[in-house]
Amino acid sequence: MKAINILVFKTNIRFKKDLKIIAPCLQTFKSVVRWNIDWKDADRILRIESAYGDPVEIIKTINMAGYHCEELPD
């Protein structure tokens, strides 16, 4: 069994309708096991459980979809 990494990002994903854009983007990553957005947090925290720990491609993909995404330190 592969180790699971938890990646945490600050985003500007504001509405549940934005998930229609974000979900297909995240589904392109075979290593993503699960993800969610903390709607109560002002920084709209995106947490991703992934078998692969490099956040660069995820950031690029979210940015290309028109949203801000930056990794938060551990």
Image: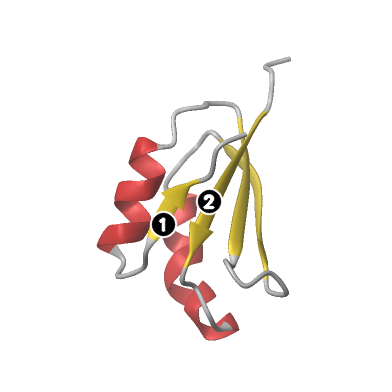
Q: Which residue is mark 2?
A: 9
The correct choice, above or below, for 41 with respect to 2 in the image is below
| Residue 7 image position (x, y, % from top left) | 58, 39
Q: Amino acid at mark 1?
A: Cys
Percent across and percent down for residue 36 are: 66, 59
Label 1 and label 2: CA atoms lie apart by 6 Å
* Label whose residue precedes the other's in the sequence (1 or 2): 2
Q: Which residue is mark 1?
A: 69
Task: Quarter of the image for the C terminus: give it.
Answer: top right
Q: Is residue 36 above or below residue 34?
A: below
| Quarter of the figure with residue 15 | bottom right
Determine the residue positioned at 45% across, 62% down: 24
Q: Are marks 1 and 2 in contact (CB under 8 Å)?
A: yes
Note whether 12 is above or below 15 in the view shown.
Answer: above
Front-lying residue, 30 or 42: 42
Q: Residue at x 57, y 66 (%)?
A: 43
Residue 68: quarter of image: bottom left
**Badge number at residue 21:** none
